[in-house]
Image (spheres, rainbow, N blue to C red):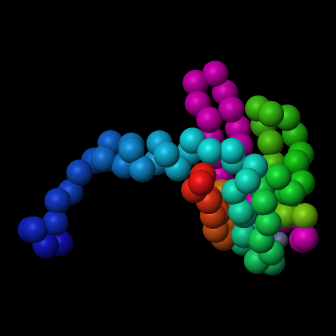
Amino acid sequence: MSDDVMVLDGNAAAGALGSLFAFDATTAIVRCGNCHASGPLAELRFYGSPQAMVLRCKNCGEVNLRLLETESSINLDLRGAARIDISRAT
Ligand SMILES: [Zn+2]
């Protein structure tokens, strides 16, 4: 790694990530990692409860998102999504 590259810890990403996650998640466009269909998160198939959920692709049924919420943390697993696009509010 070059000496002229400034390396910071993850706190440096707080501003950008803060704005990224301050949005209505149901409007995010999710691209399925299996069949590559794209559509709003709101159109995925929801299984489970608000604290322990699985969202599946409406086209192929592949799991695109898993979320587990406990008293101490929220675990978000996006392995099944090839991509998530978030539009900026205008
Ligand atoms: Zn799919």
Residue under the point 13% across and 73% down? 2
Outermost residue, bottom side: 35
Looking at the image, can residue 28 be seen?
yes
User: In percent of the image, x 85 and y 64: which residue is there?
Assistant: 57
Residue nearest the viewer, comparing 88 with 30: 88
Coordinates of residue 63 in the picture (x, y in percent)? 80, 60
The C terminus, quarter of image: bottom right
Ligand 1 lies in which image quarter?
Answer: bottom right
Instruction: Specify whether residue 34 is in view.
Output: no
- Residue at the farthest left position: 3
Q: Nearer the viewer, residue 73 or 59?
A: 59
Q: In the rendered picture of this protein, how many numbered marks are placed on residues?
A: 0
For the record, the magenta segment spans 59-77
- Left or right of residue 38: residue 81: left
Q: In this view, does 68 lie above or below 28?
A: above
Q: Is residue 46 magenta?
A: no
- In the image, residue 60 lies in the stretch drawn in magenta: yes
Which x, y percent locates residue 41? 77, 56
Determine the residue positioned at 78% across, 60% down.
40
- Residue 88 versus residue 55: which sits nearer the camera? 88
In which quadrant will I find the N terminus?
bottom left
